[in-house]
């Protein structure tokens, strides 16, 4: 038996066959941060950035990104997402992004949650890059992953 699920016997990458897996309720939560200068945080908080409402745009970008994950990551399955929630919160010297993705299916949604966080953070970076040259995106990680059997 091959110990790597995404590699065939000859060592080539392959998409995992999930057809025989049980349908379950899948949930994943991911988070990440972007460190910004205090002036940038202040402008974002007052909604005074030239490119518009940074936090709302980042949240929408994260939602859109989660829906496109299988187009971006070659071995991800295209899956129906039942819930995508992306929240941003302003901290003293950073913005925290948290994404929650839920599906009823045969494969997990952690890549969708991580993609949502990454793109939301990159959107913040893009919208602030003209005034803040010291931004740092950091600590992107999966913080929760669950699967629950569906009662028959």
Image (tube, helix red, strand yellow):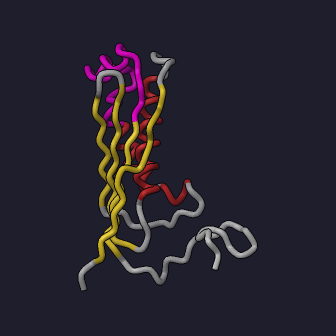
Residue 144, x across and y down, in percent: 34, 54
Q: Which residues are magenta?
A: 33-57
Q: Say left or right for 4 vs 68.
A: right
In which quadrant of the rendered image does the N terminus lie? bottom right
Q: Say left or right for 139 vs 75.
A: left
Q: Please determine whether, in this image, residue 132 is positioned above or below residue 69.
A: above
In the rendered picture of this protein, how many numbered marks are placed on residues? Answer: 0
Residue 70, x across and y down, in percent: 51, 60
| Residue at left offset 47%, top offset 84% | 20
Q: Please determine whether, in this image, residue 46 is positioned above or below residue 99.
A: above
Residue 151, x across and y down, in percent: 24, 81
Q: Please determine whether, in this image, residue 69 is positioned above or below residue 34.
A: below
Q: Magenta includes 53?
A: yes
Q: Magenta includes 74?
A: no
| Residue at left offset 32%, top offset 23% | 44
Q: Say left or right for 108 vs 74.
A: left
Q: Nearer the viewer, residue 43 or 101?
A: 101
Q: Nearer the viewer, residue 109 or 69?
A: 109
Residue 90, x across and y down, in percent: 29, 28
| Residue at left offset 47%, top offset 55% | 68
Would you identify the image quadrant in which residue 46 lies? Answer: top left
| Residue at left offset 35%, top offset 22% | 93
Quick one: which residue is furthest to the top in this view? 39
Quick one: which residue is furthest to the right in this view? 10
In which quadrant of the rendered image does the C terminus lie? bottom left
């Amino acid at each position: 038996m091959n110990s790597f699920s995404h590699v065939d016997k000859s060592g080539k990458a392959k998409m995992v066959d999930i057809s025989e897996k049980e349908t379950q309720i899948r949930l994943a939560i991911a988070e990440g941060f972007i460190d910004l200068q205090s002036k940038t945080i202040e402008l974002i908080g007052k909604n005074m950035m030239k490119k518009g409402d940074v936090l709302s745009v980042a949240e929408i970008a994260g939602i859109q990104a989660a829906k496109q994950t299988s187009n971006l990551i070659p071995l991800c399955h295209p899956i129906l997402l039942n819930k995508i929630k992306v929240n941003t919160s302003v901290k003293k010297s950073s913005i925290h992004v948290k994404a929650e993705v839920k599906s009823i299916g045969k494969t997990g949604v952690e890549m969708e949650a991580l993609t949502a966080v990454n793109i939301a953070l990159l959107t913040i970076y893009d919208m602030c890059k003209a005034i803040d040259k010291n931004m740092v995106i950091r600590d992107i990680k999966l913080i929760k992953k669950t699967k629950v059997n569906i009662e028959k």
